[in-house]
Amino acid sequence: MPKKPLSRRTFLRGAGGALVGLPLLEAMLPKLLFAHATIAKRFVVSFCGTVVGNDTLSSPGVYGALPTTMPPSWKGLEPVRAHVSLISNMNIPVYSATIPATEPASAYNMQHGTTPATTLAGVTSIETMPIMVKAQTADQYAVAALGAGSKLASLQLRTQVLPYTGSNNNHNGVMSAKMVNGQLLQLPPIVSPAQLFTTLFGVATTPGGAPALARQASVLDLIATDAQRLTSNLGASDKVRVEQHLEEIRSLERNLQAAISGGGVSGCGPATAPVDPTIGANAFSGWSNETLRGQMMADMIAYALACDLTRVASWMMTFEQVQMANVVDGLTQMHDDSHNAQLRPTNIAANCNWHATLFARLVGKLASMPEGTGTVLDNTFLSLIFAEAKTAHGRSGMRHLVAGVPSRIKNGLHIDGAGTHPGRIQIAGLQALGVNTNTLGELTGPAPITV
């Protein structure tokens, strides 16, 4: 360890103004803290703006171990089914103009746009509302308890680029909010994989304004000399971590470039930072290659967590009341499919599975990353929350996914939610990570998912 601790703001610097941030290292900690450093705990909440499908499509059958062959709505979970659990039979109470809200975290009259506030912040929604206007969300409670020491307090991401309604006056693309000096601030998500890459790696631009990566095969080529100088002065464990950090960047660059090349995106040149796919028209059934965008985001979220660039992430895969094109033929939007359960059951299952597959990609990445005597997934709680139940406007019999922290959270199971409110999933997740809380907004007590 160097005699003088490294600054936590230390960057590797290179030609053309390139900067690459470092993960938290032992050399950055005061000596008294060094012996007590522990593995970070991490919290990820993801959101899907549509439905899961009827029981034939979305139920694995009896409660207990998840089957080897999953139903159509969850096929993408099969490679990681040992690490995830599906919770069924969860209910959000509802109220209307004539029936008052008598239960905590109720949703107004089966309307779209009212469940995210109940599930992510644990508060009663109003008739017409953006996703968050009343209370701090669970991810920001996690920031307060877990986030100290990481480069970024939290990440807010969204894969669906546009609302695809013909208007940008749609607030349903925000899922995270925090209280600051008594004021609630909505936290706009990053929608560009290229911007996410820059946010995580701190890649600067040249004096002329052109991205440094646009002129090189890799950002690592630009900072190689600085990296070699730093690692020669580090202790053995820090040296290993920096080398792993740089190799993860190299791997991400290769994977992202391969994905871009395979996705038919032209004009990428030699740059290895992700080039955002073309944005489609902001019209119903719009599409901006959200599959590729979601894959890029899943990989970078995993990297950010593993290298302690952040410990908390909120990932909105799709808008509430999602008008994005369905993933079967693109002729109708996911929301329209959800209102046609009898005519388009396979569409509904495929739409649900699209979200589950992205979630599985993130889970699988974390499960493959060694940490201590286990993996990064062992110290990460993840959930995928759905806006609605089996069909449009459904609030009863809801199904949601959780993963990670197997020492505290049940993994590999189909779990009976016993009618509990899905907002309690976030309470259980926070508790599993050691956060001393038993409430979220108006809700008290965890969902029945803990070991």
Image (cartoon, helix red, strand yellow):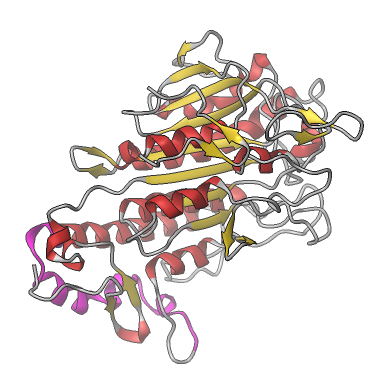
Give the x, y percent position of residue 321: 76, 42
* Residue 214 lies in the magenta-colored region: yes
Query: Closer to the camera, 277 or 31?
Result: 31
Quadrant housing the C terminus: top left
- The percent coordinates of residue 311 (x first, y second) are 39, 52
Name the outermost residue toward the bottom.
Answer: 208
Whether residue 81 sits left or right of residue 426 in the image: it is left
Q: Answer above or below: position of 405 versus 204.
A: above
> Could you say where residue 361 lies in the image, as x and y percent from the top left?
45, 40
Query: Where does residue 61 sit, x and y in percent of width and height?
Result: 56, 10
Query: Which stretch is magenta?
Result: 209-238
Image quadrant in which the N terminus is located: bottom left
Up/down of 301 relative to 22, above or below: above
Residue located 58% across and 66% down the image? 181
Q: Nearest the camera: 286 or 28?
A: 28
Q: Main secondary structure of the magenta part?
A: helix
Residue 254 at least partly seen = yes
Q: Which residue is more in the foreground, 15 or 306? A: 306
Q: Residue at x 7, y 74 (%)?
A: 3
Residue 146 falls within the magenta-colored stretch: no
Residue extending farthest right: 98
Seen from the viewer's position, the closer of residues 377 and 125 is 125
Q: Is residue 400 left or right of residue 336?
A: left
Report which quarter residue 270 is drawn in.
bottom left
The reply to whether residue 392 is in sight is no
Q: Answer above or below: position of 205 versus 307.
A: below
